[in-house]
Amino acid sequence: MSETDILHAVMIRLSQAGAKIFRNNQGVAVYPDGSRVRYGIANPGGSDLIGWVPVTITPDMVGKQVAVFVAAEVKTPRGRANPKQRRFLDAVAAAGGFAAILRSEDDAARLVRGRRGE
């Protein structure tokens, strides 16, 4: 299965689990005058997928729902995240978000249950 196939399956699974997920394309646009503009969230290093998952907080916090940031780097079984991608995932997790490298739909389901992947 290609990384693109895994990405599409992961997006479906995350959405089915209640997450709002968006593809975070990254790159550099080069204009005719030679100027360059980087695009994408946290470029370089931002995750393939970003979004949020609604979480109901505890009654001692008024029982409201909050959005918890989600960052998912999609890789094939043998694919590896680069250091900038890992740093981004670590920063999201350290701030209380859900962040992981996802290699399957099952990984996606675990992520939205709040268990960090590799």
Image: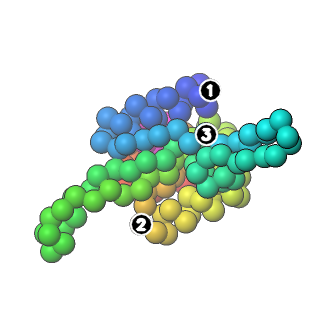
The residue pinned by badge 2 equals 96
Question: Which of the image's four quarters has the N terminus?
Answer: top right
Along the line of sight, which residue is nearer the eye, 110 or 25?
25
Is residue 88 within the magenta segment?
no
Q: Amino acid at mark 2?
A: Gly
Residue 106 appears in view: no
In the image, which residues are magenta?
A: 104-108
The residue pinned by badge 3 equals 25
- Kindly report which numbered mark, 1 or 2, lies closer to the viewer in this rendering: 2
User: In the rendered image of this protein, does residue 105 appear above or below residue 94?
Assistant: above
Is residue 105 within the magenta segment?
yes
Query: Where does the image place residue 99, in percent across and percent down from the top left?
Result: 49, 55
Along the line of sight, which residue is nearer the eye, 40 or 115?
40
The residue pinned by badge 1 equals 2
Q: Earlier in the sequence, mark 1 or mark 3?
A: 1
Q: CA distance from mark 1 to mark 3?
A: 17 Å
Q: How is the image coloured?
A: rainbow
Residue at 42% across, 56% down: 69
SS for dot 1: loop
Q: Does the magenta stretch mainly form a helix, a strand or a loop?
A: helix
Q: CA distance from mark 3 to mark 2?
A: 23 Å
Query: Where does the image place residue 60, in percent across and percent down from the top left?
Result: 15, 74
- Kindly report which numbered mark, 3 or 2, lies closer to the viewer in this rendering: 3
SS for dot 2: loop
Q: Is residue 56 left or right of residue 14?
A: left
Residue 110 appears in view: yes
Q: Residue reaching furthest bottom?
A: 60
